[in-house]
Amino acid sequence: MIDLNAVYIIWLREMKRFFRDRSQILIGCVRPVTWLFFMGYGLSPSVHNTRGPGYVSFVLPGIIVMAVLFTSIQSSISIIWDREFGFLKEMLVAPISRTSIVVGKACGGTTLSIIEGTIVLLLGPLVGVKLPAVEVILCLLIMAGLSFGISAMGITIASRMKSFEGFGAIMNFVVMPLFLLSGALFPLQGLPPWLGVLVRLNPLSYGVDLLRGRLLKMQQYPTLLSLCVLSGRELVDHRVE
């Protein structure tokens, strides 16, 4: 069973740790903004699009997902820190279930990811994307579901790693392909068959597609299919050893 008080305490600890680390806040904000404006405006002259939004507007949903992805994964590193300094052992011997520990950690990562993603989302008017209140709420819900699944994946991997170096190597091997094959930087139509298969196998593609459908009214996959795929991402092994 889940101890809600334990979940809240673990979540609160993650929040305090994040907001006390100013460098982490700065990097979390600068990275997606740099990608959005430098990459977006840098490639915009090379992308000839006579219909639909400009390239900078097109990549905005993908950059939002990038902020959610990196923040969710980065929050999982706290598992290794806690094991290194013995705090994880104290949590494991506490009279709370391990599920509560995982849920608290995942909720912390989800909250931080939503904060970072919202910062990028609010840049929409600067690149020509309108933000009706209803669409903003729907985007926040999509980000919440996506970030919870990614946080759970990161926690699952981090719980089995013994060093920061090993976790970093695994994350670079996993995160960059997930992002680059999500359709965040290119349209999903007209792809080579082999690349189209890889994109469809990537669960992150459906999150980008949902956000793009809400913000730009451009959606490749049915909404129900995307929601089913994203909910399936959260069905992972949550054991912390």
Image (spheres, helix red, strand yellow):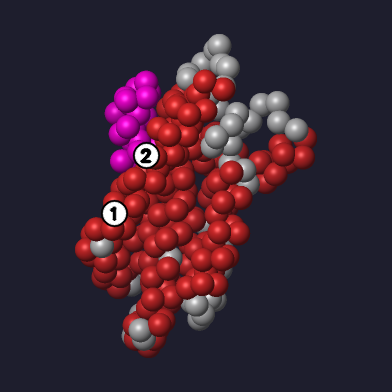
Q: Which mark is residue 177?
A: none
On screen, 186 above or below 234?
above
Asked if residue 128 is among those painted magenta in the image, a careful observer would answer yes
Q: Which mark is residue 25?
A: 1
The residue sitting at 32% across, 25% down in the picture is: 126
The residue stretch that appears in magenta: 118-139
| Nearest the eye: 156 or 80 | 80
Q: Amino acid at mark 2?
A: Val
- Check disc 2 and report the residue beneath it: 33
The residue sitting at 46% across, 43% down in the picture is: 65
Q: Position of residue 195 (x, y in %)?
A: 72, 39
Q: In terms of image quadrants, where is residue 222?
A: top right
Residue 229 shows in this picture: no
Asked if residue 184 is among those painted magenta in the image, a careful observer would answer no
Q: Position of residue 219 (x, y in %)?
A: 55, 27
Q: Position of residue 230 (x, y in %)?
A: 54, 47
Circle 2: element type = helix
Q: Amino acid at mark 1?
A: Ile
The residue sitting at 34% across, 52% down in the picture is: 27
Residue 105 shows in this picture: yes
State the count of labels. 2
Query: Majority secondary structure of the magenta segment?
Result: helix
